[in-house]
Image (cartoon, rainbow, N blue to C red):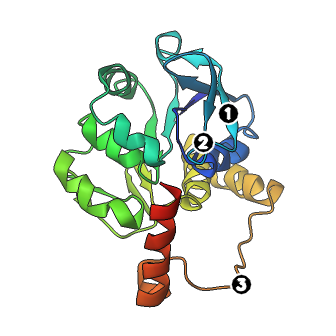
Amino acid sequence: MDIAVVLFPRLTALDAVGPYETLQRLPDTTVTFVGHQRGEVRTENGYLGLTVDKTFDEVVAPDAVIVPGGIGVLDLLEDKVLLDWLRSVHATSRFTTSVCTGSLLLAAAGLLPGLEATTHWAFMDKLTEFGAVPASTRVVEHLEQRTITAAGVSSGIDMALRLAELLTDQVTAQAMQLMVEYDPQPPFDAGSVVKAGPLVTARAKELFQEKD
């Protein structure tokens, strides 16, 4: 089984690495990082480098596709090479998925027409520009259309576990969860806009602007 994870400049690291860390443990599975050209890309703050192993034209029929998010997505919403590749591989993939703002790329490629989809809370409105319907759910799946979208960053692990179940079986997916000891017990309950409240949300927006 071949799983392709898209890389691009200024992506969010955990969007790609979280699902990778889960899915690379599946039996008889290869995870390949794909992008416009081989070599290193830097994450959104520039501190971390990830390596593209193969170009888009070298990966033509993966079983599953994962598109991470990050501020770099905004530079790719009209990128013909990437969008054409997504359309092409989705025609034969078992599932095409996204994490965070990666769903904007799925929508821009025309893979989410009229479908509910999720993304990072700060970019929900942008989904409508590409014909998708924003949903404030952590993971949104459309099994008939073979798409799964996950909300911001950490939800990519949730999505990957669900994808593992769909690609194999529930017991194997649960074994993946145990292997990475994914048992979240955060010190705060501020992981959504509703739970965080206006003060924390305002501070988060300030921090976004400082990092951009």
Q: Where does label 3 land, which residue?
A: 187
**Badge 3 local density, few (<14 within 10 Å), some, or many (20+)?**
few
Query: Between disc 3 and disc 2, whose residue precedes?
Result: 2
User: Circles 2 and 1: CB distance less than 8 Å?
Assistant: yes
| Residue type at numbered disc 2 | Thr
179 left or right of 212 in image: right
Q: Nearer the viewer, mark 3 or mark 1?
A: 1
Whether residue 46 is visible:
yes
Q: Which of 198 and 86 is in front in this view?
A: 198
| Residue type at numbered disc 3 | Pro
Query: Between disc 2 and disc 1, whose residue precedes?
Result: 2
Q: Which of 173 and 128 is in front in this view?
A: 128
Q: Residue 43 carries which label?
A: 2
Q: Is residue 98 above or below residue 39?
A: below
Q: Where does label 1 land, which residue?
A: 50
Where residue 44 appears, x then y in whole percent?
A: 55, 46
Query: Between disc 3 and disc 1, whose residue precedes?
Result: 1
16 left or right of 78 in image: right
